Image (cartoon, grey):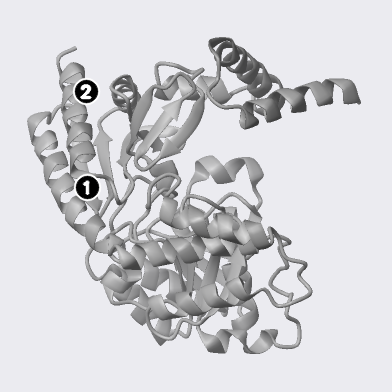
Amino acid sequence: MNIKNATEVLGKALNYLEKGPLTESDKIAMVEESVVNFKEYVNPGWFEYTKSLSTDATAIEWEGDGCRVRDINGNEFIDCLSGYGVFNFGHKNPEIVKYVKAQLERQGLQTGHLTDPMRGYLARAMAEITPGDLRYCFFTNGGAEAVEIALKLARIATGKQWYISTTGGFHGKSYGALAVTGKAKWRTPFLPLMQHVVHATYGDIEDMQKTIEKLKRVGESIAAVILEPIQGEAGVIIPPEGYLKSVRELCDKHEILLILDEIQTGMGRTGSYFRCEAEGVVPDILAYGKAFGGGIMPITGIIARPHLWDNLVENLWILGSPTFGGNPLACSAALGALNYMIKHNVPKQAKEKGEFMLARLKALQSKYPKVLKDARGIGMLSALEFYDEAVGYRFAKEMYARKVMTAGTLNNSLTIRIQPPLIISMEDLETALVCMDEALAVIAHT
């Protein structure tokens, strides 16, 4: 313990936050100190990861507004990543920030003993904009936590044990969420995980049916099927038309709950408020997050059909009692985000811009067939798939050099996701597409 050293560190950090424009010496010091801080106190592998995605591993992200991000030296980037789906409504959206500021002037966090009204208003608004009879909400802090609550609710509501997930699916890295995630890379180091989980092939309705029938044939009970309407981390994998409806029908036939993880596909990203709406499917439990906090505050959660809560009346906290879940600041951000999405018809923007963008990406695939294996997407959730992962990394670096932020799927750049803020201007979108053309041309001719 060294309180003197801690005080010095705190003084530097808080001084940087309070002061206006940074001096050149401030910038040099912050870069040097950030390298040391991350290597010695955060994660020693962080800069190796950033080197694989950019040309400057010491770039310090410092400011952001709208669809632009600036580093400490004032270099400005067009954001075509959106924090993997967080910034649907841009960075520091003033129409959302104002409600968070207003709430902060009254109260930051709640005591948990009295009724906090913003949580109630937010739950009611969610019940109105989600399909079918989805009604009761439980607010959490991160996506994996929302999935954990969904899994627990399915089990306690049905009294059944098994979960069916899908290969390639990503639902988070906490224990239960990781168990239903369908990628060995994340699961293997922690095996054995939560039991009573089996994975069917994503997009294959026959395999889903066989998986259900096999479990029932040997006497097992199935609580829920969980899947993403479009797999994000797997590389924007779009299932065959009618797949979700067929899964819904199978669940109804066998009295199994359907959990849809819309943490990335929701909040307008795919051209509708939630993807299930466009598919004509009502899940029993819907998980949401990422952009739900308007790019300002972390907040996630689930919304579920009323009858699933019958067993919870006598024990209100049996699903969980997150200290900061549904706190007033986060709820104010989510309320602002929902209001902005509806007021500006953001799903429509995503649909129209997404159609324009996908047409251009498909044209790039035709132009560079030896570089690009596929271009696909729905709404503003799109992807470029390469034949080789090293080429994907190079594409990300070429885009970074042109001041456009893109990235692969966590540690894999075989597929580069293209998912800018939904409110991106056509001018910025055009600039980003031209940069993609330039980057692919460099790769194709070297």
Q: Which one is earlier in the sequence, the residue at label 1 or at label 2?
A: 1
**SS class of the residue under badge 2?**
helix
The number of callouts visible is 2
Residue 20 drawn at (x, y percent):
56, 27
In terms of depth relative to the viewer, which is nearer, 113 or 102? 102
User: Is residue 6 placed above or below 298 in the rendered structure?
Assistant: above
Name the residue beneath numbered marker 2: 439
Query: Gap in Å between the C-alphas at discs 1 and 2?
Result: 18 Å
In this picture, residue 297 sits left or right of residue 55: right
- What amino acid is at disc 1? Arg
**SS class of the residue under badge 1?**
strand
- Residue drawn at the location 36% of the way across and 78% of the way down: 248
In this picture, residue 171 sits left or right of residue 116: left
Residue 429 drawn at (x, y percent):
21, 40
Q: Quadrant of residue 440?
A: top left
Q: Residues within 10 Å of mark 1 (few under 14, many from 20)?
A: many
In the rendered view of the protein, which quadrant contains the C terminus? top left
Name the residue beneath numbered marker 1: 376
- What amino acid is at disc 2? Ala
In the rendered view of the protein, which quadrant contains the N terminus? top right
- Residue drawn at the location 75% of the way across and 76% of the way down: 114
